[in-house]
Image (cartoon, helix red, strand yellow):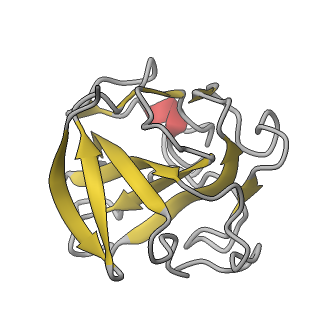
Amino acid sequence: MMKYALSVFIMGAFVLHGDDFTLSSTSFKNGDEIPAKFAMKSVAGGKNISPQLSWKGAPEGTKSFAVTCIDLHPLAKRWVHWMVVNIPADKDSLPEGASGKKMPKGSLEIENSFGDNGWGGPQPPPGSGKHEYLFTVYALSTEKIPTMKKNASGTPLIEKGNTLAKSELKGYFSR
C-alpha cells in the first residue's frame, strides 16, 4: 500500500506527493550542480544534451507521465527548459540525450522558453548567481493531454483531476 501526503492544490485538484513515487538521475544527484555538458552550447563545455531521469513507485491508475524542468531563479521568471507530455505508463526513465532523438513513442516535447521543442539546457546570464532547476515528473490518470500543442510553451500542464502524484529533483547551475 502506498502512502501519500497532501502536497499541492493545482487548478482545482489535489496533487499527491507520494513517498514511494521518486525521481532520480544518474546525470547529477538531487541538490548538486548540473554538469556543464547539459548546458546550452553557448556555455563553456555545454553540449545541450538532456539529462537522464528515472522514476519509480508510480501510483495505481497511472496512464502516462509528464516531465518538466523549470528555472526557479527570480531573474528567470520560471523559464521552461523542458516539457514532455504523453510519456507512456510502461516507461520509467528517459536516457541521457533523449530529447529529440530517443524519446518514447507517443511522447510529445513541448516548445520551451527558448522557442525550441525539446531540451534547452541551462544558460543563466553570467554573474546572476546560482540558478535552481526543478525537474518534476507527474503521474497522470490520462494517456494523453489532448489540449497540448507543440508550440504551447507556458500552457498549463496539469489539467483538473489528471495528476495522481508528482516527484521532484533539484539541480543547480551558475556561470
Residue 132 in the image: state x and y as whole percent: 25, 52
Q: Residue at the top extreme? A: 26
Judge from the rendering whether residue 88 lies leftward or rightward of residue 25; answer left or right: right
Q: Quadrant of residue 8?
A: bottom left
Task: Note whether 175 is above or below 128 in the view shown.
Answer: above
In the image, residue 76 sits, relative to residue 107, either above or below, namely below
Residue at 33% in and 42% down? 167
User: Furthest-front residue in view?
Assistant: 1
What is the quadrant of residue 171 in the picture? top left
Q: Quadrant of the N terminus?
A: top left
Given residues 173 and 43, the one toward you in this image is: 173
Q: Residue at 33% of width from left, 72% of height from top? A: 76
Residue at 35%, 64% in the rendered image:
125
Question: Which picture quadrant has residue 172?
Answer: top left
- Residue 90 position, x and y percent, is 68, 30
Residue 132 lies, with reference to residue 19, above or below; the image says: below
* Image side of residue 34 versus residue 63, left or right: left
Q: From the viewer's perspective, is 59 left or right of 76?
A: right
7 and 134: which one is in front? 7
The residue lying at 32 percent from left, 51 percent from top is 134
Q: Is residue 168 visible?
A: yes
